[in-house]
Amino acid sequence: MHELYRRWLDELWNGDPSAANDLVTADFAGHWPDREVRGPGELAELIHGTHEMFDDLAFELTVGPIADGELVAGRWVGRGTTKDGEPATFLGNDILRVRDGRFAEYWVASLPV
């Protein structure tokens, strides 16, 4: 489960949205405070859109991953540069539910700092 989460952050969120097809289930449900995402296609679109808003956006694991049963959690920092040239930093916490070797459900809380 630790390796799966590292792939989630290192491959998927660091710029390869197509990795969603390998990392999440067909019925994946992602829960953001202001949005619900269903399936790998919607997840890939969201990640692509996120990267379109920033230059050089990259995410780094700062705590974890921590696994317990079917759940895995991690804390990360994301850094990039806005299209206006301003530096941007985000801190976030992820909780994911694993089913059959893929992520089936995701909860995230993140804030700019």
Image: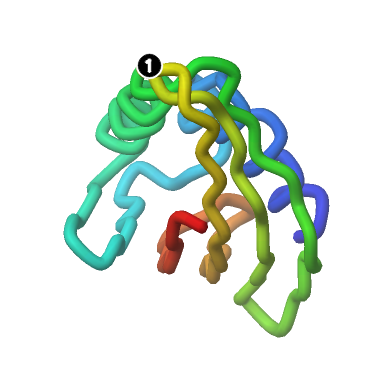
Q: In front: 86, or 21?
A: 86
Give the residue drawn at x 30%, y 50%.
Answer: 27
Q: Residues within 10 Å of mark 1 (few under 14, many from 20)?
A: few
Type of residue at label 1?
Lys
Q: Position of residue 40 (x, y in %)?
A: 36, 35
Q: Is residue 43 left or right of residue 68?
A: left
- Above or below 110: residue 49: above
Q: Would you identify the image quadrant in which residue 33 lies?
A: bottom left
- Above or below 33: residue 89: above
Q: Position of residue 86 (x, y in %)?
A: 47, 27
Q: In front: 97, or 100?
A: 97
- Secondary structure beneath dot 1 equals loop
Q: Is residue 33 left or right of residue 8?
A: left
Q: Position of residue 84 (x, y in %)?
A: 37, 18
Residue sitting farthest toward the bottom: 68
Quarter of the image where the N terminus is located: bottom right
Give the residue drawn at x 48%, y 44%.
Answer: 24
Q: Position of residue 71 (x, y in %)?
A: 61, 75
- Above or below 62: residue 90: above
Q: Is residue 54 left or right of residue 26?
A: right
Which residue is denoted by mark 1 in the rendering? 83
Give the residue drawn at x 71%, y 35%.
Answer: 10
Q: Would you identify the image quadrant in which residue 9 lies?
A: top right
Q: Tell me how many marks there are.
A: 1
Give the residue drawn at x 46%, y 18%.
Answer: 85
Q: How is the image coloured?
A: rainbow
